[in-house]
Image (cartoon, helix red, strand yellow):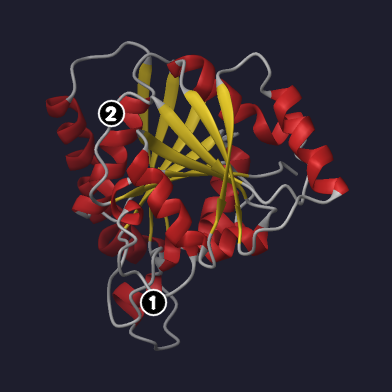
Amino acid sequence: MKNILLPTDFSENSWNAIKYAVNFFEKEACNFYLLHVNRIGNNIMNGSPYIATEEVLEEVYTKPVKQQIRKVLKRIANHFPPNKEHRFYSLSDYNFFIESIRKHVEEKNIDIIVMGTKGASGLKKIIMGSNTGDVITKVKCTTLAVPEDAEFVKLNEMAFPTDFSLNYDIQILQPLTDILEHYEAILRILHISKKNTDLNIEQKRNRELLGDYFNDKKHSFHYLTNKKVEDAIQCFVESRDINMICMVAKNLNYFQQILFHSKIEEISYHTEIPFLVLHEKN
């Protein structure tokens, strides 16, 4: 039984992530936890030092949120055929967003967080919405970030960008292995270098380890040279039937080049292709 956390702000963007998650895990037994987190101060204190009573919290915050979550659950019931393998639970919290996510990940033994990301928005035009960006960098739990324009399709190919600078243990890669087995998908291991240089001894060793680990899965290695990592991935995604991109969070320098640069022109995969981030567990 998989435990899946679905943070929602009741936007169409988060609804799209919920739809994707329910489709993605259609044939697996799952507990889905819908979670809405809000700061009380944003709602009822207006920056004043007033301390809300339990009654006020219930009336002003908890009741409306529960109603909203019920609407989402009804929408799920209307949108999807009944699935006896799926159970849905509602959670609400008034706390700091990341603290709340961490708490529920631990308490509910969450296997994966699935959440929407707005893509490029606002003046800064950042790739990841701030909440999603915070979760994938600060919460040690596998996270699937679903862009607002992503539509669920059966996985055929997954891209795994890596610079071969780190070796990954089996525990980190297990969620990726599970997905490859479930969908019989092909893994495209993608090395991008800014200059046309040979791999060093450590990189070659880590490449061999990856090859051994995925030996019984359909996989291939690909090598691209481009000064901009994100442009290389864009070209690769466009040239193949890539349905999901997967990375390991501890490869942070490489990871940030791809997800958190600010120029979004021509980087359309960020609005269409889900991004799976693998974490070491505590």
Quadrant assignment, res 72: top left
Query: What amino acid does circle 1 point to?
Result: Gly
Query: What amino acid does circle 2 point to?
Result: Val
Query: Which residue is outermost to the bottom?
Result: 48
Is 91 in front, or is 132?
A: 132
Mark in the foreground, 2 or 1:
2
Which residue is the site of mark 1? Answer: 41
| x and y, in percent, of residue 212 in the image | 75, 23
Local crowd size for mark 1, using a 10 Å CA cut-off: few (<14), some (14–19), many (≥20): some
Which residue is the site of mark 2? Answer: 153
Q: Residue at x 23, y 34 (%)?
A: 73
Q: CA distance from mark 2 to mark 1?
A: 40 Å
Q: Residue at x 17, y 41 (%)?
A: 71
Q: Is residue 22 above or below residue 217?
A: below
Dot 1 falls on a residue whose secondary structure is helix
Looking at the image, is mark 2 or mark 1 earlier in the sequence?
Answer: 1
Q: Is residue 167 above or below residue 22?
A: below
Q: Residue at x 39, y 53 (%)?
A: 234
63 vs 175, left or right, is: left
